[in-house]
Image (cartoon, helix red, strand yellow):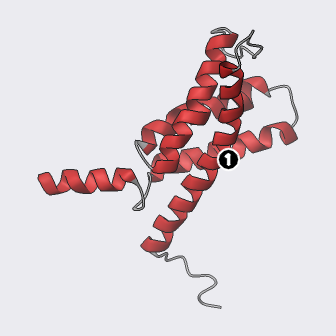
Amino acid sequence: MKKLFNTNFSNEGVHFMLLVLRVAFAAFMIVHGYQKLGWITAGGEIQFGDPIGVGPVASLYLAVFAEFFCSILLLLGLATRIAVIPLIITMLVAVFIVHAPDGFDKKEMGLHYLVVYLFILVAGAGKYSIDHIISSNLSRRR
């Protein structure tokens, strides 16, 4: 019973779960971004929403940048805190602008992503990341 309510945690366990969280959520979002990237590479007229008033083409490019390219950085753990900022903005736009009139069922997934990205922004990439390797190398040089 004591272990069940123990609030101490293992650093290794936290680092491993940061890896799992990063990789899983990056992979999930890459699927969305890859689909949108296909719309760009297919040619033809772009039919995409313009939720922030920058035009449909720019909105699509911003979504692809965040959902596909920033998710690849997140997957690798490279520039993680910077990479999640466009993802956070994308989820804020999706939840509070695109799906503003919709019910909670339409907003829920975007809110899940938003909470995870906010956590990663605060926690960082963890030990199993390129960020950690870069940070370790910079520490050794000092």
Task: From the top left corner, tell me how far across and down residue 11 is, in percent.
Answer: 43, 71
Which residue extends farthest front?
Answer: 42
Task: From the top left corner, tell me how far across and down residue 77 is, in percent.
Answer: 45, 50
In screen coordinates, is 137 left or right of 142?
A: right
Image quadrant in which you'd find residue 88: top right
In screen coordinates, is 86 left or right of 124?
A: right
- Label 1 sits on what residue type? Phe
Looking at the image, which residue is at 57% across and 45% down?
117
**For the residue labelled by badge 1, is the local secondary structure a helix, a strand or a loop?**
helix
Looking at the image, which residue is at 28% across and 52% down?
135
Task: From the top left corner, tell me how far across and down residue 44 is, in percent.
Answer: 74, 10
Looking at the image, which residue is at 78% across and 43% down?
108
Q: Is residue 88 visible?
A: no
**98, above or below 120, in the image:** above
**110, above or below 136, in the image:** above
Looking at the image, which residue is at 64% across and 84% down?
4
Task: From the top left corner, tell me how far across and down residue 81 is, in percent.
Answer: 44, 42
**32, above or below 93, in the image:** below
Instruction: Give 38 or 74, whichever is nearer the viewer.
Output: 38
Report which residue position mark 1 lands on.
28
